[in-house]
Image (cartoon, rainbow, N blue to C red):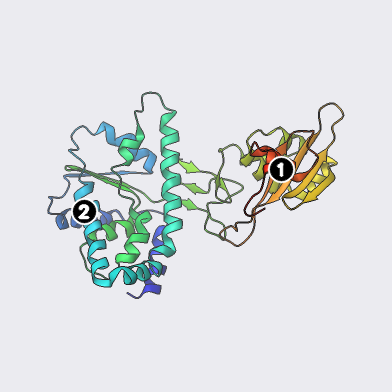
Amino acid sequence: MNHITAQDTWRAVAAATGPADRAAAEAGVRLAYRSAGLAGPERFHWVDSPLAAVTLVPTLGDRGRSVRDEVRTRPWAEERRRLHDALGPAGWAAHWRTTGAVLWDLTRMLADRIRAGVTDGLERADGAGDPRLVLLDAVLGQHDAAWLAAFDGHGDRLAGLAAVAEHAGWWWPYENVAVLCERPVALHRDEAGRLDRGDGPALAFADGFALHAWRGMPVPAGFLAGLADLTPERIREEENAELRRVMLEYFGYDRYLTASGARHEHRDGTGVLWRIELADDEDVVMVEVVNSTPEPDGSHRTYWLRVPPATRTAREGVAWTFGLHPDAYRPLVET
């Protein structure tokens, strides 16, 4: 399989939604065990999400030890070493750039967000134990697509792992039992590949486990529902700076400034200082800064920094956020 075809194939695997092919996935698990010199699992348990799997695994008292090391870690490392030795350091780097690197940000982001969502969900539950210990036993299935793209066409030692990835989500290999997850039922991303949806979960599983995000930033499940009714007052009251930024992006910066009666007070190389005068409270003073580091889509993110009412210049305000005197604030690259 050539690089372009492998990229396209594994990109589709990483983003796949809908019902798993359970028979094909179970056949892949058995092949992965055989390739590792192990007898296949006696039983398969299917669940609707990684959260359900992490909840189920501790209840399977006869599951035996985890065989992730034999099934995934060792063959993975040996295949990478074989390819590295065959291609040489420069050849391996070039090979990775044209295969796995293209998918790495997408798969790493999804895996990290799922782990965080599972951990957060179960740490809120009484007596749930530490979900991170169970997560260590997971094989990421479709979200291992970046590495599987790099290994594609270079032997069949990882064929079992690839088959499971093509037909199912995350899975947990134990001596006697394998726990497999269905794939998500929905995945919504922006043009840069980040999780993004303004009217529901950006990633959702059949059992209700879901992740909400706005342009890649995690947000609480109920947060998005309130965006349609935003007011300048609600935005000013939000204490979380990242959530306030989401509100401002949704509401519109120009609209917010107009609706708030903001006054343009100062501009310099660090940003623009705006002041909103309130009749029954202290002034709201904010510095508008533009991040010099571009986003994945090439755009530059705008931030609004709340600063003390006595602030008179944009530099003074930005310096205050770093705990510095304006004269001591000398960024290498100003935003």
* Sequence order check, earlier mark of 2 and 1: 2
Q: Three-letter amino acid code at disc 2?
A: Arg
Residue 253 in percent (x, y) is at 75, 49
Q: Quadrant of residue 246?
A: top right
> Outermost residue toward the bottom?
2
Q: Which residue is mark 1?
A: 327
* Label 1 SS: helix
> Outermost residue toward the top?
126
Residue 133 drawn above or below residue 99? above
Question: Viewer-proximal residue, 268 or 39?
Answer: 268
Q: Which residue is mark 2?
A: 74
> Outermost residue toward the front?
327
Residue 84 drawn above or below residue 180? below
Residue 132 drawn above or below residue 108? above
Label 1 neighbourhood size at 10 Å, few (<14), some (14-19), many (20+)? few
Q: Closer to the camera: disc 2 or disc 1?
A: 1
Q: Name the residue rendered at 12%, 54% in the picture.
A: 37
Q: Quadrant of residue 125?
A: top left
| Residue 17 appears in the rendering | no
Label 2 neighbourhood size at 10 Å, few (<14), some (14-19), many (20+)? few
| Residue 284 appears in the rendering | yes
Residue 267 in percent (x, y) is at 80, 50
| Residues at discs 2 and 1 in contact (Cβ within 8 Å) | no
Residue 93 in percent (x, y) is at 36, 67
Q: Name the residue rendered at 36%, 49% in the picture.
A: 182
